[in-house]
């Protein structure tokens, strides 16, 4: 190799190292911000606690009095951890969905999984269904999970049978979404006032039903899906450059898209089974991560999960502080927290582009 070629290769290697270092620092910053938001979420609430008490309660619970220990361990920690794992699930699912469908407006609810989960919950609430003697607290999230997963599997089967093109998948999802919404509306029409109120509360999304067992289930689904997502990161990065180019480089686009939709269905169903419908996170978190990290999915996928966890933690904090003494449904607050941040990032990006 000539001296000129060696210098060019050395320059490219340095540029690549800087590229990787910047993105590793951005992912680390998102992780640190998510941890800080988690601690603040545990500290916030009607009985305000100091961060010192929170850290002490997490590190050495015996050092606190019984009342504070119960508040932290039995109420605040499950609530805050559920916000983190659900936000991470929705953020990761949104990033994969937007790439697989090549649609920046796609989200985990595009294929009707959210509406299907609401249908499953509504059936249990209105008709007091019982199965194998299970209590309502167990049957309701189980029904929501089963219906959300069934809706996604139906889309996968139809896509596999009729061709897994982007347009067919989206159209199937939209048709299923409107159909399920019509059925849910019919159920609400025939239900009594108390049942309608419970269904509406479900559609608003709430972390109040969180327990450590439920957190563990959602975290397990996330831990199973994330490695498979990262394994396909290079193929998803190629897909962003166009389907034809990805195929020419050996990517089985249709197979990869079906696997992505399967992972998205699992992540969305697990998240929604316990907290209800929480929109906006799966749409905005990937855009925030993309603005910070670019299109390299080695960094975009974990960054989207961390951005989703951070957004939902911030929304959880705001839901407890906006109205003193009242915990608002977190699904209402997600848009209030996410929209200003998203607009700020978009405006900042536009200004930087204009300056260049």
Image (cartoon, helix red, strand yellow):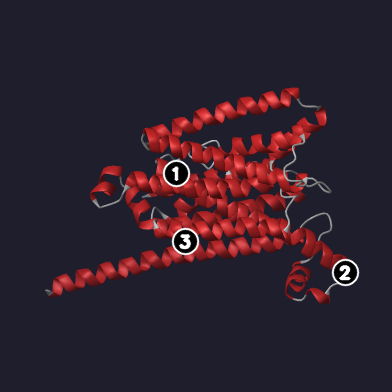
Q: Residue 66 — which label?
A: 2
Query: What SS does tag 2 mark?
Result: helix
The residue drawn where x is 75% and y is 47% is: 134
Q: Is residue 22 above or below residue 199?
A: below
Task: Tell me whether the residue at label 3 lies in contact with that at label 1, contact meaning CB atoms closer than 8 angstroms.
Answer: no
Q: Quadrant of residue 53 in the image?
A: bottom right
Of marks 2 and 3, which one's residue comes earlier in the chain? Answer: 2
Secondary structure beneath dot 3 equals helix
Would you name the residue on which mark 1 appears? 98
Residue 142, percent from left and from top: 67, 46
Q: Residue at x 81, y 60 (%)?
A: 48
For the point 70% across and 26% down, which residue is it? 187
**206 or 13, nearer to the observer:** 206
Q: Closer to the N terminus: mark 1 or mark 2? A: 2
The residue that disc 3 covers is: 227
Q: CA distance from mark 2 to mark 3?
A: 40 Å
Q: Earlier in the sequence, mark 3 or mark 1?
A: 1
Q: Position of residue 289 (x, y in %)?
A: 48, 53
């Amino acid at each position: 190799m000539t001296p000129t070629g060696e210098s060019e290769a050395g320059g490219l290697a340095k540029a690549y190292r800087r590229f990787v270092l910047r993105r590793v620092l951005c992912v680390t910053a998102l992780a640190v911000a998510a941890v800080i938001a988690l601690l603040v979420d545990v500290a916030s609430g009607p009985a305000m606690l100091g961060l010192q008490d929170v850290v002490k309660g997490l590190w050495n619970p015996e050092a606190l009095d019984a009342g504070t220990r119960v508040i932290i361990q039995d109420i605040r920690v499950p609530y805050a951890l559920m916000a983190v794992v659900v936000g991470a699930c929705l953020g990761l699912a949104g990033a994969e969905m937007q790439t697989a469908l090549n649609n920046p407006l796609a989200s985990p609810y595009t294929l009707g999984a959210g509406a299907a989960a609401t249908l499953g919950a509504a059936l249990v609430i209105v008709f007091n269904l019982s199965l194998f003697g299970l209590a309502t607290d167990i049957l309701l999230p189980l029904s929501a999970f089963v219906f959300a997963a069934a809706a996604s599997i139906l889309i996968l089967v139809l896509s596999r049978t009729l061709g897994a093109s982007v347009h067919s998948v989206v159209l199937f999802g939209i048709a299923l979404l409107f159909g399920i919404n019509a059925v849910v509306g019919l159920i609400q029409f025939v239900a009594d006032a108390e049942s309608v109120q419970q269904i509406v509360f479900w559609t608003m999304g709430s972390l109040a039903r969180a327990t450590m067992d439920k957190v563990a289930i959602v975290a397990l689904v996330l831990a199973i899906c994330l490695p498979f997502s990262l394994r396909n990161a290079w193929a998803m990065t190629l897909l962003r450059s166009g389907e034809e180019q990805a195929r020419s480089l050996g990517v089985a686009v249709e197979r990869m898209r079906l696997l992505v939709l399967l992972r998205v269905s699992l992540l969305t169903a697990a998240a929604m089974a316990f907290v209800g419908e929480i929109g906006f996170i799966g749409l905005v978190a990937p855009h925030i991560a993309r603005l910070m990290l670019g299109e390299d999915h080695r960094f975009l996928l974990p960054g989207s999960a961390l951005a989703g966890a951070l957004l939902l933690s911030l929304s959880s904090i705001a839901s407890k502080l906006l109205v003193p003494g009242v915990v608002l449904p977190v699904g209402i607050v997600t848009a209030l927290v996410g929209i200003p941040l998203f607009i700020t990032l978009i405006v900042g990006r536009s200004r930087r582009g204009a300056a260049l």
